[in-house]
Image: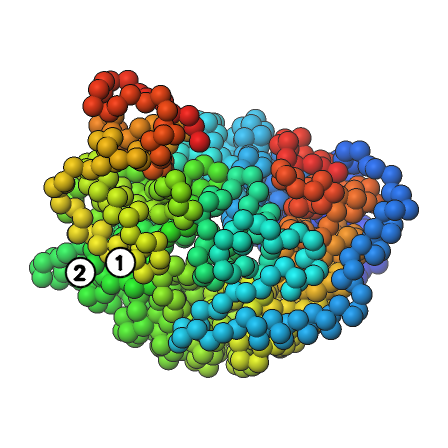
């Protein structure tokens, strides 16, 4: 959005007249080029004409909380939408903190879209409940439907996918990631008609059943525009090689299992196929990896910008050898099987790295636990100065280490540290981890997302409130000493949008200290804190434009509010709340 | 635009201007009484400033008390109890899991709640042995279910190809995170593959009456009732310490051979009988249906005392029709 244009409109004394004589058609054409949602929201507030022009020209709508608005309101305001992104349940539902059948069902949206958005092309859902019937309705109701992406959704089976494959003649994207799907069989893949050729993105990496390989091979061969292919673990190396021959143009590849025994000839064929993949930017999969076959990949790694090894239990030497061949890496996800030595290799080989995620291979400590420590993280920070996004699961950390890390990498925008044992102090000094997060918020002025862990007192939250001026998302668990902590955050962070808290000693005083702030936020989640029903009722009464929902669990004290979810909404209280959700 | 009543539709600070929709305030509001004001201002004794110093004091002793350097890999002994955290209130450590293990986690409030949580993600009878506290808390560490399930499957690999010493067999049901739909990971791996390599697995829980700690067994490693039954007899005869279970999980790779001795669990001669819960939630006697049908409908196993399995005809008689036991 060109800020100059807006300024001209305001600065000139005849701003009103100028705006009203500006032809709508021109304005709409110009606004069609504005893509960012924030910018579009700004545009819509300028004046009535701009509001109208913006709403007519909007083709993509992003709804971060499906209950903040109703489908009727959306279709009334934006008549020409072709692409919708919807997010449903609170994020902690990914970790089983939200009981099943909570809601966020796509059905009521689809019914309305079916009537008003006949030209709907794209639907991207995150944490929504989607039934097979909904998928079938989707497939049959929108003749131009092109792209379906489901992330962390539930409620559907592979039958729903079969409906999509059978009926969506213009499908370009089918992206099934990490869902709670009832995987009945792989036959859905065979439902793509033989004359269907438009597919560009196919991701079924997280489905477990076999698909018919010949059908897959034919599909890949005839879809000449395919540039993203992520297959599941059941696809063998030999089959992968055949797929690569059909689709050397792939930009993103997710392999199947990298384990099957190969003859020498098969191995060199595989290597040759990878050699032909010159466009590969993203590589993932590699589950069940036999390290001896990794070198087959090397020729394809030259242009890799994103390498997702979070399903591959690699050791440090194997990772080191692989990274030598990936000079352009910007994003890397690994399992902590690579240990600190592997992280040192990352520091040495990936100077352009911007994002690192280290996942735990043994989160429940059932084996002999190694994993990564603070030294690995420090090593990465010395080598990868451009690092701005980190997700790090570890079992020990020190305040001094974090201070060093952020000194090396002051540009963090996303800092998510998970010390896996709750309430664990600095293991060397035995002090709380307050100073670590103080260093983070003081040094990283661009910080937008923060997840804290370890033993933390209210001091951490004082620092956050005082210094984290750009913070938008904060995740807190097992931390803080009193209401004061949360009050500091709510009284500080001006850009806070999402606050999610579990198992902290924050009660009603804390909850209510932010009541004016919640309307400028997307949502607040508090579970297993010290909030009571009375506190929630008070909040609901004072702030009628907020939905204050409490989830009750059986057998607990009725005055305690176990799980509280507060969010702003123009749609009023939910009409589809299940019995265990009380809207106050 | 700070503070503007926002709507998600605009992302960020977007607003529906021009009076979008009337808002009905939800539900009934109770009147706020004086009592509530007291509640609001002083409910938490933890808001008094002394508490924070006390907290730091506790923090130090907490650190000192609980941080024992266990060998080179720092397994932290979790000996915190509820009284270390007075602000977590009077939700006490009376939870069953804390009492029967030598350790308790630091967040007993969520622990005791976790035990009564509807849609339990861990069965109450599987108790974490003295490991890290992270295994005792619902939804912690914050890892998505699909990743946890795939970690379980990673453990099941031919030992010759990949050696992964880090992932032992899961013994408690933390890996069962199907969001109330039963064994989430297991149902996705229902089909045993006969391709000379074990590529998909079907772990189900096994509990034996009288033993509080459950086990898990991979049904895809068996092709008949006899080997399964032998495996279970071996599992529950040996002691249930960690090392033994890891050892037996490695041995399982060798247990593919056909049965050589009749299983006592199957022929009715022992004081225990093997039962399973099927997809409909009913408890059935193991052995009546063909193996393939059993595999596709079994959700979990229970080794039940014969005396409790009342009303069952001896197995050697009628094979048609199902014998129904009382659901647990």
Residue A71 lies in quadrant: top right
Furthest-right residue in view?
B34
Q: In this view, does B71 lie above or below A515?
A: below
Q: Mark 1 lies on which chain?
A: B
Count the marks.
2
The residue depicted at 35 percent of the width and 47 percent of the height is B215
Q: Which chain carries label 2?
A: B
Residues at marks 1 and 2, CA–CA distance in whole angstroms: 16 Å
What secondary structure is marked by label 2?
loop
Q: In this view, does B49 lie to the left or right of A306?
A: right
Instruction: Tell me the residue that label 1 is attached to.
Output: B247
Q: In this view, does A223 lie above or below A287?
A: above
On the image, the x and y values in percent for residue B251 come to 21, 54
Closer to the camera in the image, B198 or B15: B198
Q: Choose the circle earlier in sequence order: 1 or 2.
A: 2
Q: In this view, does A290 lie to the left or right of A515?
A: left
Q: In this view, does B23 lie above or below A478?
A: above
On the image, the x and y values in percent for residue B160 come to 17, 60
The residue depicted at 36 percent of the width and 30 percent of the height is B307
On the image, the x and y values in percent for residue B188 come to 35, 40
Q: In this view, does A50 lie above or below B42?
A: above
Residue B160 marker: 2
Residue A64 appears in the picture as rendered:
yes
The residue depicted at 68 percent of the width and 57 percent of the height is B88
């Amino acid at each position: 959005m060109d800020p100059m244009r807006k300024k001209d409109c305001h600065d000139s004394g005849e701003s009103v007249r100028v705006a009203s004589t500006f032809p709508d058609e021109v304005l709409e054409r110009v606004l069609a080029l504005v893509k960012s949602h924030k910018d579009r929201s700004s545009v819509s507030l300028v004046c009535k004409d701009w509001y109208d022009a913006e709403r007519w020209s909007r083709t993509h709508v992003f709804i971060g909380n499906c209950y903040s608005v109703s489908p009727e309101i959306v279709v009334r305001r934006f008549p020409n939408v072709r692409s919708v992104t919807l997010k449903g349940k609170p994020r902690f539902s990914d970790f089983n903190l939200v009981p099943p059948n909570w809601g966020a069902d796509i059905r009521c949206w689809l019914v309305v879209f079916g009537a008003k958005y006949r030209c709907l092309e794209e639907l991207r859902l995150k944490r929504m409940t989607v039934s097979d019937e909904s998928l079938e309705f989707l497939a049959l109701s929108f003749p131009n439907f092109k792209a379906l992406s489901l992330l962390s959704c539930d409620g559907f089976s592979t039958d729903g996918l079969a409906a999509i494959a059978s009926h969506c003649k213009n499908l370009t994207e089918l992206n099934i990631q990490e869902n709670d799907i009832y995987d009945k069989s792989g036959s859905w893949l065979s439902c793509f008609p033989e004359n269907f050729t438009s597919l560009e993105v196919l991701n079924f990496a997280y489905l477990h059943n076999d698909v018919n390989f010949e059908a897959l091979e034919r599909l890949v061969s005839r879809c000449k525009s395919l540039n993203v292919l992520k297959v599941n673990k059941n696809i063998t190396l030999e089959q992968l090689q055949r797929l690569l021959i059909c689709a050397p143009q792939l930009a993103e590849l997710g392999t199947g299992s990298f384990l099957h025994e190969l003859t020498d000839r098969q191995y060199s064929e595989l290597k040759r196929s990878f050699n032909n993949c010159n466009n590969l930017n993203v590589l993932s999969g590699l589950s069940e990896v036999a390290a001896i076959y990794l070198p087959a990949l090397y020729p394809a790694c030259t242009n890799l910008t994103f390498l997702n090894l979070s399903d591959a239990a690699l050791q440090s030497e194997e990772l080191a050898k692989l990274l030598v061949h990936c000079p352009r890496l910007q994003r890397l996800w690994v399992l902590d099987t690579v240990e600190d030595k592997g992280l040192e290799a990352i520091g040495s080989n990936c100077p352009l790295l911007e994002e690192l995620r280290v996942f735990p291979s043994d989160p429940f400590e059932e084996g002999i636990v190694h994993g990564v420590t603070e030294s690995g993280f420090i090593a990465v920070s010395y080598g990868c100065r451009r690092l701005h996004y980190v997700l790090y699961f570890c079992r020990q950390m020190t305040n001094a280490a974090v201070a060093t890390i952020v000194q090396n990498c002051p540009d963090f925008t996303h800092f998510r540290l998970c010390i896996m044992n709750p309430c664990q102090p600095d293991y060397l000094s035995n002090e709380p981890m307050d100073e670590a997060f103080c260093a983070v918020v003081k040094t990283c002025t661009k910080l937008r997302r923060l997840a804290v862990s370890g033993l933390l007192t209210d001091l951490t939250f004082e620092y956050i409130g005082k210094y984290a001026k750009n913070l938008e998302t904060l995740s807190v668990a097992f931390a803080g000493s009193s209401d004061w902590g949360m009050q500091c955050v709510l009284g500080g962070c001006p850009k806070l949008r999402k606050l999610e808290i579990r198992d902290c000693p924050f009660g009603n005083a804390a909850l209510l200290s932010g009541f004016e702030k919640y309307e400028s936020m997307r949502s607040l989640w508090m579970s297993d804190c010290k909030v009571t029903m009375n506190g929630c009722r008070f909040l609901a009464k004072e702030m009628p434009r907020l939905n204050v929902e409490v989830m009750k669990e059986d057998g607990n004290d009725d005055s305690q509010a176990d799980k509280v979810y507060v969010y702003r909404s123009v749609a009023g209280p939910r009409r589809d709340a299940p019995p265990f959700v009380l809207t106050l | 635009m700070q503070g503007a009543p926002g709507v998600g539709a605009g992302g960020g600070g977007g607003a529906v201007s021009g009076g979008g929709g009337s808002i009905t305030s939800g539900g009934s509001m109770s009147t706020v009484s004086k009592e509530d004001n007291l509640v609001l201002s002083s409910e938490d004794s933890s808001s008094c400033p002394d508490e924070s110093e006390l907290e730091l004091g506790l923090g130090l002793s907490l650190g000192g008390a609980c941080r024992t350097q266990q060998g080179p890999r720092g397994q932290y002994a979790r000996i915190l109890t509820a009284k270390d955290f007075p602000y977590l209130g009077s939700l006490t450590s009376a939870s069953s899991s804390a009492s029967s293990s030598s350790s308790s986690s630091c967040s007993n409030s969520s622990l005791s709640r976790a035990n009564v949580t509807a849609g339990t993600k861990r069965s109450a009878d599987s108790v974490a042995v003295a490991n890290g506290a992270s295994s005792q808390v619902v939804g912690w560490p914050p890892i998505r279910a699909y990743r946890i399930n795939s970690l379980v499957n990673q453990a099941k690999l031919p030992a010759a190809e990949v050696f992964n010493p880090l992932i032992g067999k899961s013994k408690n049901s933390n890996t069962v995170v199907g969001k109330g739909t039963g064994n989430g990971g297991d149902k996705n791996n229902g089909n045993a593959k006969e391709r000379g390599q074990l590529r998909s697995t079907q772990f189900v829980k096994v509990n034996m009456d009288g033993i509080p700690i459950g086990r898990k067994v991979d049904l895809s490693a068996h092709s008949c009732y006899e080997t399964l039954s032998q495996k279970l007899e071996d599992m529950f005869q040996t002691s249930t310490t960690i090392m033994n279970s890891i050892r037996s999980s490695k041995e399982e790779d060798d247990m593919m051979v056909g049965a050589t001795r009749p299983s006592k669990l199957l022929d009715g001669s022992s004081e225990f009988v093997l039962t399973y819960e099927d997809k409909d939630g009913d408890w059935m006697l193991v052995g009546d249906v063909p193996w393939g049908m059993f595999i596709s409908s079994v959700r979990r196993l229970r080794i039940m005392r014969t005396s409790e399995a009342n009303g069952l005809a001896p197995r050697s008689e009628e094979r048609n029709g199902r014998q129904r036991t009382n659901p647990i």
